[in-house]
Amino acid sequence: MEPQFDLVIRGGTVATAADIFSCDIGIAGAKVVALARDLPRGTDEIDATGLLVLPGGIDSHVHLDQYQGEGIVMADGFETGSRSAAAGGNTCIVPYALQRKGQSLREAVADYHVKAAGNSLLDYGFHLIISDPTPAVLGQELPALIADGYTSVKIFMTYDDLVLKDREILEVLSIARQYGAMVMIHAEGYDQIKFMTDKLEQAGKTAPYYHAASRPQLVEREATHRAIAHAELVDVPVMIVHVSGGEAMEQIEWARSKGIRVYAETCPQYLVLTADHLKGLNMDHAGTKYVCSPPPRDRASQEAIWRGIVNGTFQTFSSDHCPFRYEDTAGKSNPKSKTSFRWVPNGIPGVAARMPILFSEGVTKGRISLQRFVELTSTNHAKLFGMYPAKGTIAIGSDADITLWDPSRKVTMTQSLMHHGSDYTPYEGMEVRGWPVTTILRGKVIFDEGVALVERGFGQFLTRDAAGRI
């Protein structure tokens, strides 16, 4: 008898955001077609005894091959970035298509398709970063792109080349409401940061550590409150990304108590790093390795973030993977960065470390359930960004995107395990318990025990449905 399945995964414990159960998984034509015990044999078989069988991770906050200013080069393009994501148990990523000032939004999207085409190992979509909301962008390009399946937008309340004025934010939110897009907001106050940076430099406080001092929690709190007020005025849901501590969380929780639709995301750096890492650990200028925005804060902030993960304040857990090389004059060690924290490229690598950190610190240590882990790392990303139920779950008819996870494996994270283009990991030496051993995309094993098994270009571009709700 001919095999009924292309692949059967046997003997594992299957976990979704809703359930945990034991069964075999039958895969045919890149889809899950059977969930039952003692399935007939497949053309290929995987013994998952002792392993968790999870929906493939979805990281909806990843920066790849993104313009950073003259002379600065991001460490990951789509090939190395997606390989690193696969190593970390992910099957789908959603990077950003950045519109530069003076550029049409359509042109920006076309540029990113050129960068991604034939390079990604994983399935991928694009969020649209709007930095120049001209009448043509708002009236023509953005509505047309949303209709074409680019159903999420990111806007910035800080950075010289990206910041939008309040009126511009309101205009973008209005288009998102009309056409059904999700707006992600980087909430930090531009003028406050510029003021603090100038004052710190005038006082001679230019070391990497003062990056954190230039962006205290109140800067994030104020911008989060303002973003929420804009969303309330327009009556549109928004997502506040990379929330770093309790003060911004309080604004989000207050908004929800008033019935305002606000989603929230946090990241691993806010669970396991603090501002003290920016001091450099007695190594010359090494604190630049940890410069990101918002910056890691303190132990009290870490505990606040954990409360938000446990109590449902956060819907997604993303990496905000934004990689630069440390030993590189086009990266963290560019000549100007040694004169002031102002010039250090903002961002750290983390797409491979995201899921292991949350599993180890959350599930293994009893803070969150396995179902909550799946929800935060996969299912909610798919729901909010128009990919569910094809992505983000294990169900009949869903894409066979699956990660086999060893819950008892102890691993010390090192640069060599990250498979990214950066020359360091901010999580070097951190011990985790629980590790992705096999990553399967559309029924094909793409990464197994630290080795990529497909060539670049295996990943497919995703057009996405209208933004969902949770």
Image (cartoon, grey):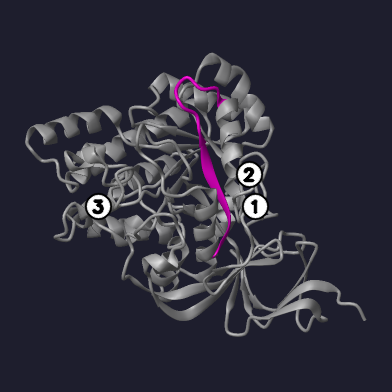
Q: In the structure shown, which secondary structural element does the residue marked by tag 3 occupy?
A: loop
Please give the name of the residue rendered at 44% of the width and 21% of the height, measured from the top-left corner. Answer: 168
Rendering coords of residue 77 (x, y %): 50, 47
Rendering coords of residue 30 (x, y %): 75, 61
Q: Is residue 13 above or below residue 424?
A: below
Q: Earlier in the sequence, mark 1 or mark 2?
A: 2
Rendering coords of residue 424 (x, y %): 34, 59
Residue located beneath label 2 in the image: 117
Res. 215 in view = no
Q: Amino acid at mark 3?
A: Arg
Crowd band around label 2 with a 10 angstrom C-alpha radius: few (<14), some (14–19), many (20+): some
Residue located beneath label 3 in the image: 297
Marks 1 and 2 in Cβ contact (< 8 Å):
yes
Using the image as rendered, state which of residue 7 and residue 458 is in the foreground: 458
Residue at the extreme top of the image, as rendered:
135
Q: Which mark is residue 457?
A: 1
Res. 438 in view = yes
